[in-house]
Amino acid sequence: MCQYLIHKYNVAGPRYTSYPTVPYWDISSFSLQRWKDSLKRAFNESNDLEGLSLYLHLPYCESLCTFCGCHKRITKRHEVELPYIKALLKEWSLYRKLLGAKPKIKELHIGGGTPTFFSPENLRFLITELLRASDIAESYEFSFEGHPNNTTKAHLQTFFDFGFRRVSFGVQDYNIKVQRAINRIQPFENVKEVTEWARGIGYTSVGHDIIFGLPFQTEMDVIETIEKTKELMPDRIAFYSYAHVPWIKGNGQRGFKDGDLPSAESKRRQYETGKRQLESAGYLEIGMDHFALKNDSLYKAMKAETLHRNFMGYTASKTQAMIGLGVSSISDSWYGFAQNVKSIEDYYNLVEQGMMPVYRGHILNKEDLKIRKHILNLMCHFKTSWSDIEMTFDELPEVLIKLKEFEQDGLIKFETKLLTVTEKGKPFIRNICMAFDLLFQRKKPDTQLFSMTI
């Protein structure tokens, strides 16, 4: 890749799991009632047709991984499991009461934290109660995140019995020096064992998460990690850029210095080398940072142009309503976003009072909704059309000015009212989306809010 383009476009930018991005939410005009109204509207419009998505955030981990930017609570005390599960179920009952009719669940994803911190017995209780008052959509997808060091056969069987067919395991990197730096020691044998268990039980999509740009990581480390990964041939691979955001409170990114991280050029070589390896093994690039075999639902969704992106990342189908349960979870009604409190104690207190534990959010205006569609199209399909979104070129003059530069650099091309990202432009998809981000352009932050795009 051209070093000139790397230097030019290696700036801080969002990953666009939402638009507007969280730092640009208008919290001054947000209220819990407006959020409830927007969710009820979305539910009434979409539940019968497509159902809704549920995300459950289980925040507990036994040890701190120092690459992690998620909200979590470190403890070895497993007596915390049941009180948290009961609070989740109380929150879900508040949403069911609001919605009025029986929800139809199309997607259920359990993340964290470490979901497999919880015992199989407690997880069985959680999912049983969660699904008791719900219908399940005809074409549903249930998935969870498993830690290779503590996921047992009993965990995998428990989830499988409830219809879970997709699991993702965090690998990151197999080099022991890198693993020590990020405090994530897990041998290849552990990953191999849980992958084979999952396949033996009947999971149809096993995913591995690999990260490039980690402290002390080299191009050879990426090569060796992917070579080991190819021995297991997971159905789906998330090949992420490490997001270095040490300024975010509580994210745990410590234990190494900025100087221990690879340069932007080295990091980009890691990605390009890894991408070539994956493609030579039969993986196809899906959206940003994801690769899948042709048998995987993510690839099929890309081909059918039903790929969707939200706070759960890329999903194989779209639901208008997504409810996030648990501390720090974010919900999405398409018309609005709402985020839960980040403190477990505050979360318990609000739920016990019969209050939804929301502390901030954003209600989208007409401009937000149009731009959101463009960014979603670009992130999922590497193209967007002005005619499909019922707007003219003239409606977004600031965007067109920014896009001219990308066109001159060969990263995009225009055809009538269609914008298509070129192969050369795909690594810069976050930058291209930033051209549409009018909120970011109108009020650029004084301090760094986002990770670097490269």
Image (cartoon, rainbow, N blue to C red):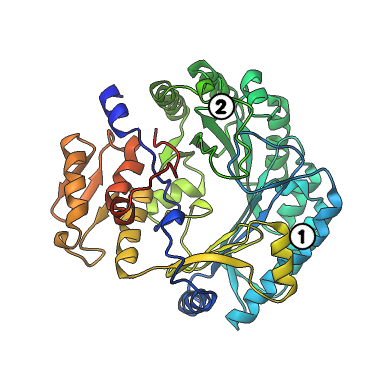
Front residue (pair 281, 239): 239
Classify residue 146 by image quadrant. Answer: top right
Front residue (pair 325, 187): 325
Crowdedness near tag 1: few (<14), some (14–19) or many (≥20) residues, C-alpha within 10 Å: many
Query: Could you tell me the amino acid type at mark 2?
Result: Lys
Query: Could you tell me the amino acid type at mark 1?
Result: Tyr
Question: Which residue carries the number 1 mark?
Answer: 84
Residue 256 in picture, x, y percent from top left: 60, 25
- Outermost bottom residue: 100
Tell me the element at label 2: helix
Q: Earlier in the sequence, mark 1 or mark 2?
A: 1
Q: How far apart are marks 1 and 2 (CA)?
A: 38 Å
Q: In this picture, is 272 found above or below 393?
A: above
Crowdedness near tag 2: few (<14), some (14–19) or many (≥20) residues, C-alpha within 10 Å: some
- Outermost front residue: 446
Q: In this picture, is 335 found above or below 220?
A: below
Q: In this picture, is 103 found above or below 150?
A: below
Q: Which residue is drawn at 58% across and 79% down?
A: 99
Q: Which residue is drawn at 41% across and 38% down?
A: 285
Is residue 271 visible to us here? Answer: yes
Front residue (pair 287, 160): 287
Tell me the element at label 1: helix
Question: Which residue carries the number 2 mark?
Answer: 230
Q: Give the number of the mark in front: 1 or 2.
A: 1
Q: Residue at x 34, y 64 (%)?
A: 368
Residue 174 in picture, x, y percent from top left: 63, 23
Q: How many marks?
A: 2
Quarter of the picture containing the N terminus is: top left
Q: In this picture, is 96 found above or below 59?
A: below
**Left or right relative to 296: residue 417:** left
Residue 205 in picture, x, y percent from top left: 59, 45
Is residue 382 visible to us here? Answer: no
